[in-house]
Image: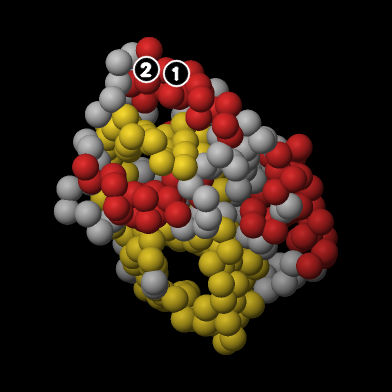
């Protein structure tokens, strides 16, 4: 038996058709299920906390934000169900990371039914959780500032267009970052704590350095660049998924604290996380079992 949490607003406007397909699939396989549809931000968290503990499996149908909300709702539970994910969002960073078929309901359902359980770290932040990335600075506003209609019409191209537009507004900020092995102080264009290979469909981290259930998050910092030419060169490299640069720092850590001179806007799993001048993050090792 399983619970299904579905966000019919995710993706390119095929929400109800996608839900109908997964229901028909469950009926065809004689799988008993309960279906819950989200209708507001944060609703997946409420639904997961209230209902997901009743069954051994939870299937999430939606984008990365819906998955992140649902997993946050599981964290307070003493016994957490195994989680399946059918990605129908736009960037689909989690799907890109773990190799799930995107925007294909039947393939996703088969992947879930025949998949293998994998332990997955969750991130704890001040005031809640994050599933795969918490970030500030360059490009981070693209995920939540890109209009929903553009996401539906253009898909990942909407993020790329938003990123290109944001190049002219890139700015550095002074940050002190305390992490497991030390402290870094400087001027940075971007910073993040992540447990993913991909961020916003734009930034790819080195897969050979990342383990999703090793009890460590990846701390990524991009230093201030000396001139506009260097900025353009780095931006081009990042957009082409190349992070080999003297201006990019990557560390593996259980915890990190970011201290700013003034409040800085963050994004958590592609959603606006508000402004924070002092914020802490912590790895929750192997907190969730994902089936893929």
Most foreground residue, 274 or 26? 26
Q: Nearer the viewer, residue 49 or 141?
A: 49
- CA neighbours of label 2 inside 10 A, class few (<14), some (14 to 19), many (20+): few
Disc 2 to disc 1: CB gap under 8 Å: yes
- Observer able to see residue 49: yes
Q: How many marks?
A: 2
Would residue 215 be visible to someone looking at this image? no
- Separation of disc 2 and disc 1 at Cα? 5 Å
**Residue sitting nearer the eye, 158 or 139:** 158
Q: Position of residue 248 (x, y in %)?
A: 58, 59
Residue at position x 33%, y 14% in the image: 29
Q: Does residue 18 lie above or below 159 as drawn? A: above
**Front-lying residue, 142 or 247:** 142
Instruction: Please tell me whether residue 218 is drawn above or below residue 152 in the rendered image.
Output: below
Quarter location, residue 8: top right
Image quarter in which the N terminus is found = top left
User: Which quadrant is the C terminus positioned in?
Assistant: top left
Q: Secondary structure at mark 1?
A: helix
Residue 104 rendering spot, x and y as whole percentages: 54, 23
Q: Residues within 10 Å of mark 1 (few under 14, many from 20)?
A: few
Q: Is residue 91 left or right of residue 81?
A: right
For image coordinates 82% across by 64% down, the residue present is 168
Residue at 78%, 67% (x, y): give it: 169
User: Which element carries disc 2, helix, strand or loop?
Assistant: helix
Measured from the top left, where is residue 70 in percent x and y? 39, 49
Q: Residue furthest left?
A: 78
On the picture, is 178 further left or further right than 175? Answer: left
Q: Residue furthest bottom?
A: 261
Q: Residue at x 60, y 42 (%)?
A: 9
Which mark is on residue 27? 2
The label on residue 24 is 1
């Amino acid at each position: 038996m399983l619970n299904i949490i579905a966000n019919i607003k995710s993706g390119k406007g095929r929400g109800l058709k996608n839900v109908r397909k997964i229901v028909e699939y469950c009926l065809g396989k004689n799988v008993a299920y309960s279906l819950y549809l989200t209708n507001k931000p944060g609703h997946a968290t409420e639904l997961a906390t209230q209902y997901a503990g009743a069954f051994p499996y939870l299937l999430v149908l939606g984008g990365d934000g819906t998955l992140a909300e649902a997993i946050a709702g599981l964290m307070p539970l003493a016994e957490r169900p195994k989680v399946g994910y059918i990605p129908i969002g736009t960037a689909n960073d989690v799907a890109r990371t773990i190799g799930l078929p995107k925007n294909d309901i039947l393939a996703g359902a088969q992947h879930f039914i025949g998949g293998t359980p994998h332990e997955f770290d969750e991130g704890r932040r001040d005031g809640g959780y994050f599933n795969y990335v918490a970030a500030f600075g360059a490009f981070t506003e693209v995920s939540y500032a890109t209009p929903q209609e553009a996401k539906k019409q253009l898909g990942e191209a909407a993020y790329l267009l938003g990123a290109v537009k944001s190049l002219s507004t890139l700015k550095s900020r002074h940050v002190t970052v305390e992490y497991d092995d030390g402290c870094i102080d400087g001027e940075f264009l971007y910073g993040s704590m992540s447990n993913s290979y991909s961020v916003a469909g734009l930034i790819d981290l080195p897969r050979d350095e990342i383990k999703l259930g090793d009890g460590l998050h990846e701390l990524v910092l991009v230093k201030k660049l000396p001139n506009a030419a260097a900025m353009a060169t780095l931006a081009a490299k990042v957009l082409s998924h190349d992070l080999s640069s003297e201006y990019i720092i990557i560390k593996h850590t259980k915890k990190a604290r970011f201290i700013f001179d003034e409040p800085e806007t963050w994004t958590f799993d592609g959603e606006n996380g508000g402004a924070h001048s002092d914020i802490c993050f912590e790895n929750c090792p192997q907190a969730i079992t994902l089936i893929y």
